[in-house]
Image (cartoon, rainbow, N blue to C red):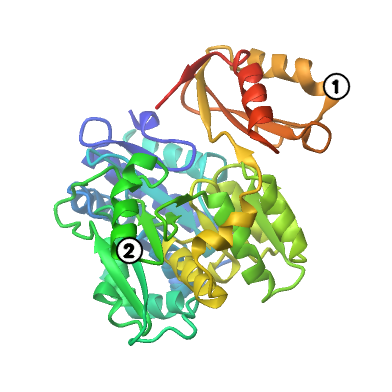
Amino acid sequence: MLGRVFKAYDVRGTYPDLLTDHMAWQIGCGVSKYLLEDAAEAGETTPMMKNIVVGRDMRTSSPKLSDELIRGITGNHGSVIDLGLCDTPMIYFAINHLDCAGGVMVTASHNPPQYNGFKVSKRKAKPVGETTGLAEVRKNAAMVDKGHEPQGGTTLEARDLWEPYKEHVLSFLDLGAYTDDKPMRIVVDASNGMAGTALPKIFGRRGMHTPGLEIVELNFDNSKGEFVHEPNPLVASNLVQLQERVVSEGAQLGLCFDGDADRCVAVDEKGEIIPCDIMTALLAPHFLGRRPGAAVVYDLRSTKAVAEEIEKAGGEALRGRVGHVFMKQLLAENRGVFGGELSGHFYFARNFNADSGVIAMATFLTVLAASGSPMSEMVKPIKRYVQSGEINFENEEKDAAIEAVQDEYGDRADVDFLDGITIDCFDDEGWWVNIRKSNTEPLLRLNAEAKDRATLDRMVEEISAMLGTRVDH
């Protein structure tokens, strides 16, 4: 049963049929064993390295799952610092701020309310995925049910870290000439998730504790664990309420968070959604101005304009695999300054190379304030190419389809296999595509870009015929 809830990057399932309280206890045991052994192998023997931080989101199942997880951790030699209700990025902050062995966030992120799960991080908030420790956690957890009852109970301590966390986040914010008399007005949709807890703690209700900022709040109530709309800001229909409110309020920016507030998507003053790769390109010069020549990482589905803007600002553009495990690793290994992913994750060197929705918000506001221009005008020159967005295709023979695409176009294009297959004819023919396999479904995912609409439409039609049955969500 445990294998059904362990995914590539986290643990997730519907509660209580797939993910049970008993599993939460097992996973707590498995997490404790793995994180403590990982710290010991790294030579980390400080007293704080017995500690594992735990936080939870607003879902109705989270308190019970958190309790059982903690019971497993403390029953298997780990000490727990319980942060209570918090956003996922606070876990990353707490691990580093307190110098702990790792941490676990009880959340199902953007999934519907009947889901829940666990995001695990190790020392220095490094992500724990299938190939970076989650397989060991699963094995350890499964062993508990085979008569290997853990021994050696330790301690539990509740701690409030909102004040130092607030200070950390606000270190990224500079509203420049905006004042209480003339504030920057923005609309924020918390999606009934943890942004509804985090933003008032950091910026004050409606931004009242942050000079120069006025926040119009949407869907900040997370007390019932229910959602007015799905807490996934990548789905355009979930942004309609925000778009309409930005226009009606005459706001300068709109922001929408996912359920655990590690992702943030922006809407300009006209109510137009700003793709996250465009935001990556917009923010890169801001960070490169502070660390000239540094690397900026971006996921390989991004518009060509991202690399062009990075290089124009004097930075090193590093293309990475999709997924926070790979993006964080690439940023750390290359001592990069910033990174962005099409999914709305933004990564910051000064945030332990980790992603944060609230720090992304602070940075968006800082760049907007410094420009003196409307957001729509700032992003307009970056939107110079035409993108397809991600298109899914049902296909039981995924490898064969990818091979067929390679055979068809490989001789006339640059081809790489960093993540799926990328066929790049951009310089010669004005287009490129990436095709990736889903880890969990019989799906192929196509992303395409061209210098003009006619070329894009032609290539998407050509390549789609080789990929299977199109799925329109």
Quarter the N terminus occupies: top left
Q: Is residue 163 above or below residue 464?
A: below
Which of the 4 quarters of the picture holds residue 188? bottom left
Say which amino acid is labelled 1: Asp
Say which amino acid is labelled 2: Val
Give the residue pinned by disc 2: 187
Is 181 situated left or right of 455 in this image?
A: left
Q: Residues within 10 Å of mark 2 (few under 14, many from 20)?
A: many
- Helix, strand or loop at label 1? It is helix
- Helix, strand or loop at label 2? It is strand
Tag nearer the camera, 1 or 2: 2
The residue located at (67%, 24%) in the rendering is: 459
The residue located at (49%, 57%) in the rendering is: 122
Asked if residue 287 shows in the view, the reply is: yes
Q: Residue 20: x percent and y percent?
A: 24, 37
Which of the 4 quarters of the picture holds residue 199? bottom left
The residue located at (20%, 56%) in the rendering is: 222
Asked if residue 151 shows in the view, the reply is: no
228, 96: nearer the viewer: 228
365, 258: nearer the viewer: 365
Q: Residue 227: x percent and y percent?
A: 22, 46
- The answer to whether mark 1 and mark 2 are in CB contact below 8 A is no
Q: Earlier in the sequence, mark 1 or mark 2?
A: 2
Disc 1 to disc 2, how far (Cα)? 49 Å
Q: Is residue 98 above or below residue 249?
A: below
Quarter the C terminus occupies: top left
Give the residue pinned by disc 1: 411
Q: Residues within 10 Å of mark 1 (few under 14, many from 20)?
A: few
Is 180 situated left or right of 336 in this image?
A: left
Number of marks present in the image shown: 2
